Amino acid sequence: MFDVLVIGAGHAGIEACMASVRMKKKTALITLNIDMAGSMPCNPSVGGPAKGIVVREIDALGGIMPIVADKTALQFKMLNTTKGPGVWSLRVQSDKEAYKKMMKEILLNTEGLTVIEAACHSVIIEDGKATGVRLEDGRIIEAKTVILTTGTYMTSTILRGHTATSSGPEDQPTVNTLSESLRMAGIKTFRLKTGTPCRVLKDSIDFSKAEVQPGTNEFLSFSTTTKEEDVLPFDQQEVCHLIYTTPTTHQIINDHLHDSAMYSGLVKGVGPRYCPSIEDKLVRFADKERHQLFLEPESRSLDTIYIQGFSTSMPVDVQEEMVHSLPGLENCIIKKYAYAIEYDAIDPLQMKPSLENKIVENLFTAGQVNGTSGYEEAAGQGIMAGINACLKIDGKDPFILRRDEAYIGVMIDDLVTKGTKEPYRLLTSRAEYRLLLRHDNADQRLLEKAYHLGLVSKERYDAFVLKMEQIERAKEELAQVHIKPGSRVDEYLQYLGFDPLAHGCNELDLLKRPKVTIHGLSSITNVDYPPVIAQQVEIQVKYQGYIEKAKRDAKHLEQMEKVALSEDLDYLHMDNLSLEARQKLDQIRPATLGQASRISGINPSDIALLAMKMKKKAKDVII
C-alpha cells in the first residue's frame, strides 16, 4: 500500500508527488504517458502577472517547477517594471520539449517515487473514504490518500467547427469512466472549456511585419537556487514578436461565427473569461478595432511558432483564412490546427481549504480538475495537496495559507469560498494584500514554513537566514551613514529631478525618495551591497508606510481566521441568520469565521451572530 497516490503527471501531479516524497511518504504516480509529464498543450510559457509570483511561492515551498522553468527557458522577461513591486512578475518563454524531458527524468530518478503508466478507471471509495484506484486493466492500487490531478483528461472532447472527437489534449487518450465514479460517490462535476491556437512553421512567417519583443537583459530566475550559469545567456535568448488582427480577420470570423464550435451549440462547457477564443473576443469586445497577438517559439527542437491570443474552435478551412489574414502570416504553413477542449471538472465548493474533498475523505484534488486554468495555478494547488495529504496521514492539522501570506492562499480561498463557473485564473486584482505578496519576498513569506514541514534542506534554510541577517545589518549600517549637503549628492538628486539637500540626513532616510538607490549613492558614500540585498532594503524603506498599513489590515483577517467553525454546525436552523446566509453557510460550510465573512451574500450581522455562537473562541475578534 502507498501512502500517497497521485493520478496525473501534469503540473499539479508533479508537485504533489514531489512534495510527498520530500515529506518521506511512500508515493506512486499514475500517468497515461510518462513522456507527457509536465506537458504544455497550450501556451509555451511559465509565469506572468500574479502567476509568476505563484511560481516564486512554489520555489519557496521547495517545488520543482521554478527550477525546471529556469533551466529550460528560451527568454526571461520581468513584467510591470514601470509600476510598483507589488505587481512585478517574471515570465519565461519555455522550451516545452526540454521542459517535458527534464520533468520525466526527475520523476523517473526520484527515490521513493513509483511511476505507473496506466489508465485509471475509477477511484475506490469505501465507507466514504478513498482507499485507492482501479486501473483499466483491472489492477487495484491501494493507498492511504489519493490526489486527483487529471487536468483536462476527464471525459474530454476535442471541438473544431461542427465536429466533436473524444480525446485528450495533443492527441492523447481521455479517461471516460473516472468522473462517473466520483459522481456515484456524491461529488458534483460540471463541464468547462478551454482551447489553443494554431501552430505555424517558423520559416513561413515574414517577421519583418512584426514588432520584436525581446526579454530583459539581466539575470532573472524563478528559483533562488538557480545560478547565472544555469540559464541561457541574454544574447542567446529567443525573441517573441507582436502583431495585430486586421479588419479582414474580423470580417472572416464574423462571417463564420455559426461555424465555430463555440457558437454552433456544440460547446456545453463555460470558457475562460480572461483568455477567451478570438471569436469570443470579437463578440464581447465588438468596439475594438484590433487585438494583440504574440508570435512565440515553442522549442529549439521544433520548427513551430505559437500564435498567442488566437485560440479558436473554427473549422480547418476557416482557420486557414483567419491565419492568412494576419500581417506576416499571409503565406504561412499551418502545422497544427487550433481546437477547443471540453472536460469534466469538480465543484470546488465541495473542497476543504486543505484541498481534501468534503464528500470523500482522503481524496484530494488539484489543478484544472478543480476549475482553474494555467500551469502555475495547477502547480500551486498540487504542492498544497501533496503537503496536506501527508499531514492527513500523520494526523496533523492541515497547512493553510492565508490571503495575506500567498497568492496560492488567495486562489484556494477563492475556490473553496466562492467556487467558479468558468476556468479560474489568478490576477493581481484578486489579492487585497498584493504589496505583501511580492515577487521579491516569497522566500520571506514561506521558506521557514517549508523548512519546518521538511520541504527544503537545512542548507537552503541556513542560506535564507543569512540573507535576512544581511538585510537587517545593511539597514542598520545605512542608518549610520550621514550624508551632508554638497555638490556630489546635490548633482545626483538634481539628475533624478529632486531639489538639493537643505540639511544633512542618513542614507536610509534618503532612500525613501523615489529613484534614489544604494548603488546610485555608492560613489558618494562608498557603501554598496549585492543586488538582492540592496533591492530588499530599498523596497522595505520606500514602501514602509504602505507595507505597515497592509500588515495592520491583514491582522484583522488573521484574527478572524483563528476562529474555527465546527463542521457540524446546524446553519439551517440557526436563529436570526438571514435565509440566504443559512443556505450558503450550509452549502459551503466554511472552516473559519474569516472564510465565512468572504462568502457573497453573508452580511456583517450574520458574522456577528456566528461570532457570538463561537464566543469562547471569538472573544478577541474585532467585528
Image (spheres, helix red, strand yellow):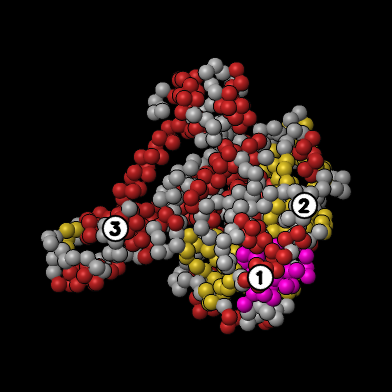
Q: Is residue 198 within the magenta segment?
A: no
- Kind of residue at disc 1: Thr
- The circle drawn on residue 566 is none
Residues marked 1 and 2 touching at CB (< 8 Å): no
Type of amino acid under label 3: Ala
Mark 1: give few (<14), some (14-19) or many (20+) Cα within 10 Å: some
Q: Quadrant of residue 489?
A: bottom left
Which of pointers 1 and 3 lies earlier in the amino acid sequence? 1
Secondary structure state at the residue bearing disc 2:
loop
Q: Give the CA distance from mark 1 to mark 3.
A: 56 Å
| Marked residue nearer the N-terminal end (2 or 3) | 2
Q: Are marks 1 and 3 in contact (CB under 8 Å)?
A: no
- Which one is in front in this view, the residue at disc 2 or the one at disc 3? 2
Q: Which residue is mark 3?
A: 474
**Does residue 259 show up?**
yes
**Which residue position holds label 2?**
265
Where's residue 223, x and y in %? 51, 60
Picture coordinates of residue 341, whole percent (x, y): 74, 56
Magenta region, residue range: 302-327
> Residue at (35%, 65%) from the top-left corner?
530
Which label is found at residue 249? 1
Residue 345 place in picture, x, y as percent: 71, 45
Q: Along the horizontal axis of the image, is 74 left or right of 334? A: left
User: In 3D space, how far apart are the residues under numbered discs 2 and 3 (Cα atoms)?
Assistant: 63 Å
Which residue type carries mark 2?
Gly
**SS category of the residue bearing label 3:** helix
